[in-house]
Amino acid sequence: MKKIILVTGASSGMGKDFALQLVKEGHTVYGAARRIEKMDDIAAAGGHTIAMDITNEENVQTCVDKIKSEQGRIDVLINNAGFGLYGAVEDVTMEEARYQFDVNLFGLAGLTQKVIPHMRKRHSGTIINISSMGGKMYTPLGAWYHATKHALEGWSDALRLELQQFGINVVIVEPGAITTEWGGIMSKPMLERSIGGAYENMAKQIADRTDEMYEKGEGSPVSVITDLVSKAVNSTRPKTRYAGGKYAKPMMWIRKYLGDRIFDKAVMSQIK
C-alpha cells in the first residue's frame, strides 16, 4: 500500500538512504533537513524535499502543514534527524549539552506532537524513532549523546503505550556501527574540546579507534538499517524494536546480561 512518509535528517547518511529506498518502493516520500540542496537526488528520484530545522518550531509546523495540505495525511513519520556530541562531561558546555537534547529529543518530540493528531483522527500510522545501540549502552566521552538516546528509548516506550489505543505503531530502530559521516562529524569537535585538558589523551584514543574502524570498513553499510526501516514501514504489525549493524546486538547483550564491570572492560579494551 502506498504511504505518505516524512523522513527527517534526509540530507545525508541513513536518512537519505531511507528516503531513496522508500521512493523506489512506490511510497510518497518527503525528505526534510536544513540542507535542502543536499537532497536534490531525492527530488530527482521522485520524492519531495522540505527545508526544516528540527529545533525551529515554525519550520516544523510549516513542514507538517505542507504535507497535510498536499497529501491529506501523514502515514509514517521517521524521526532520523540527530547528531553525536562527544566530549568529557567536564569539557562540554551546558549550552552544547542543551542543544544536543534540543535536536535529538525535544525537536523530535515537537514534530511528533504535531503529527500525532493527524494519525489519531485516522486511527492509523507508524512513528519510527531512530535511536542507537547507544540508547542501551555507553562509551567514554559520550555522556550527553547517550543521555539523549537513553531518553529517546524510554520516551518511545511510553508513547507506544499511549498510542496503541488509536492504532498507531511506535517503533524504535537501534543501529550499531554504520558507515556514514557520523564518525568524522563526532571526532573533530571532541578533539578540539579536549586540547590541553585532562581528557586529551582519551579523546585522541577514541578518535584514532573511530578512524581505524571506518578506514578498515568495520562498520556495516547503511542498507542494513534501511532494510529494517523498510520492514517496519511495510508491515501491518511492525516489531517494537529493530536492532542491526556491526556490534549492535552483541554489545547490547553484554551490557544486559554480563553486568557493568564486564561491559566497562569490553568498552575500554577498544581504546587502549
Image (spheres, rainbow, N blue to C red):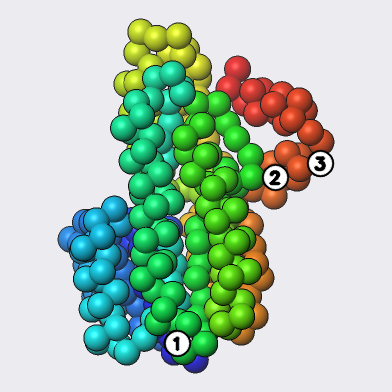
Front position among marks 2 and 1: 1
Left or right: 120, with 39 as reference point:
right
Judge whether 106 appears above or below 184 on screen.
below
Of labels 2 and 1, earlier in sequence is: 1
Q: Quadrant of residue 177?
A: top right
Type of amino acid under label 1: Lys
Q: Residue 249 carries which label?
A: none
Q: Nearer the viewer, residue 167 or 33?
A: 167
| Residue at left offset 39%, top offset 9% | 197
Q: Nearer the viewer, residue 188 or 255?
A: 255
| Residue at left offset 22%, top offset 71% | 62
Q: Mark 2 points at which residue?
A: 252
Q: Mark 1 points at which residue?
A: 121
Q: Which mark is residue 257?
A: 3
- Local secondary structure at mark 3: helix
Judge whether 185 appears above or below 10 on screen.
above
- Where the C terminus falls, by quadrant? top right
- Local secondary structure at mark 1: helix
Type of amino acid under label 3: Tyr
Spatial distance from mark 1 to mark 3, Cα to Cα?
41 Å
Judge whether 197 appears above or below 191 on screen.
above
Of labels 3 and 2, earlier in sequence is: 2
Instruction: Confirm whether residue 272 shows in the render.
Output: yes
